Image: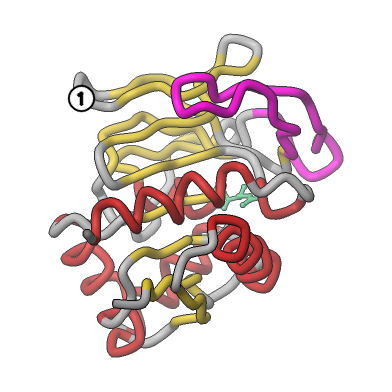
């Protein structure tokens, strides 16, 4: 059966992720499609989902409001693969504080057992790019694009650390859940999207 991938389209860089997932499906020569999904009904039909970067408070509030948050949590807990990018990773996490304003109350999925710091590398003007590596998933070098990026200060015992930058954890994985602090969809390198499509394909079969 054809693989049905989705990109959560509440707010953030949805189109860039659709293009990257499309390119990954083509490169892997997998029978699959990618669509933008927003409603609980649309979300219920996907085999794997990207939650894009953007503004986590907005994505969280609007998903709570339209019922997406509830079905997302159910599906991810039942094993649906998810790639949370930047704000998407924030949404997946259990504990969030902001580097400047400290503890904040925002809707979260409460799935990834990580302690997360929002805006950990500074604000918009401190955005930067740097080479990083994700060796344990077969991606030795990758151009990390960090935009108001979070970092992770601590992980639960069963969360795998995939990458660190300047001593800060910037990518994690727990079974079907991947979170990254940088923006793979803003580079032409589709390795991480390929890894995710492959993971979804493997977990589905
Ligand atoms: N700092 C943003 C937030 O907290 C995330 C930034 C991003 O997704 N590029 O939601």
- Above-or-below relation of 15 to 145: below
Quadrant of the rendered structure where residue 94 is?
top left
Residue 144 belongs to the span the image colors magenta: yes
Where is residue 150, by image quadrant? top right
Considering every residue shown, the one lying at the far top of the view is 167
Rendered view: 12 above or below 134: below
Q: Foreground: 90 or 182?
A: 182
Q: Is residue 101 visible?
A: no
Q: Quadrant of the N terminus?
A: bottom left
Tell me which residue sits at (49%, 77%) in the image.
33
Q: Quadrant of residue 181?
A: top right
Mark 1: is the Cβ under 8 angstroms from ligand 1?
no
Locate the C terminus by quadrant: bottom left
The residue that appears at 70% across and 66% down in the rendered structure is 16
Q: How is the image coloured?
A: secondary structure
**Can you give x and y, in whole percent of width and height, for residue 74 in the image?**
16, 65
Q: Is residue 80 left or right of residue 167?
A: left
The foreground one among 80 and 11 is 80
Point out the stretch of residues depicted in magenta: 121-145
Figure disc tally: 1
Residue 7 seen in the figure: yes
**Tag 1 residue:** 158
Residue ID at (43%, 46%):
104
Q: Is 127 on the left or on the right of 139, as rendered?
A: right
Residue in the foreground of this view, choosing between 130 and 134: 134
Q: Residue furthest front?
A: 29
Q: Secondary structure at mark 1?
A: loop
Measured as percent of width and height from the top left, residue 197 is found at: 45, 56
- Please tell me whether residue 129 belongs to the stretch shown in magenta: yes
Q: Is residue 187 shown above or below 130?
A: below
């Amino acid at each position: 059966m054809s693989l049905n991938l989705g990109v959560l389209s509440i707010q953030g860089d949805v189109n860039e992720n659709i293009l990257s997932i499309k390119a990954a499906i083509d490169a892997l020569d997998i029978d699959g499609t990618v669509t933008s999904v927003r409603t609980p009904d649309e979300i219920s039909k996907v085999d794997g989902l990207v939650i894009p970067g953007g503004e986590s408070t907005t994505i969280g509030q609007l998903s709570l409001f339209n019922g997406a948050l509830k079905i997302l949590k159910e599906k991810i807990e039942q094993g649906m693969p998810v790639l949370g990018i930047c704000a998407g990773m924030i949404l997946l996490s259990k504990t969030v504080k902001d580097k400047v304003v400290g503890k904040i109350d925002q809707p979260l999925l409460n799935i990834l057992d990580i302690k997360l710091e929002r805006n950990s590398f500074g604000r918009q003007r401190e955005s930067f790019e740097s080479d990083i590596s994700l060796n344990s998933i077969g991606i030795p070098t990758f151009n990390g694009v960090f935009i108001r990026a979070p970092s992770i200060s601590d992980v639960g015992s069963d969360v795998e650390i995939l990458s660190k930058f300047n001593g800060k954890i910037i990518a994690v994985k727990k079974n079907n859940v991947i979170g990254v602090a940088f923006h793979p969809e803003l580079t032409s390198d589709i390795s991480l999207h390929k890894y995710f499509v492959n993971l979804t394909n493997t977990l589905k079969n």
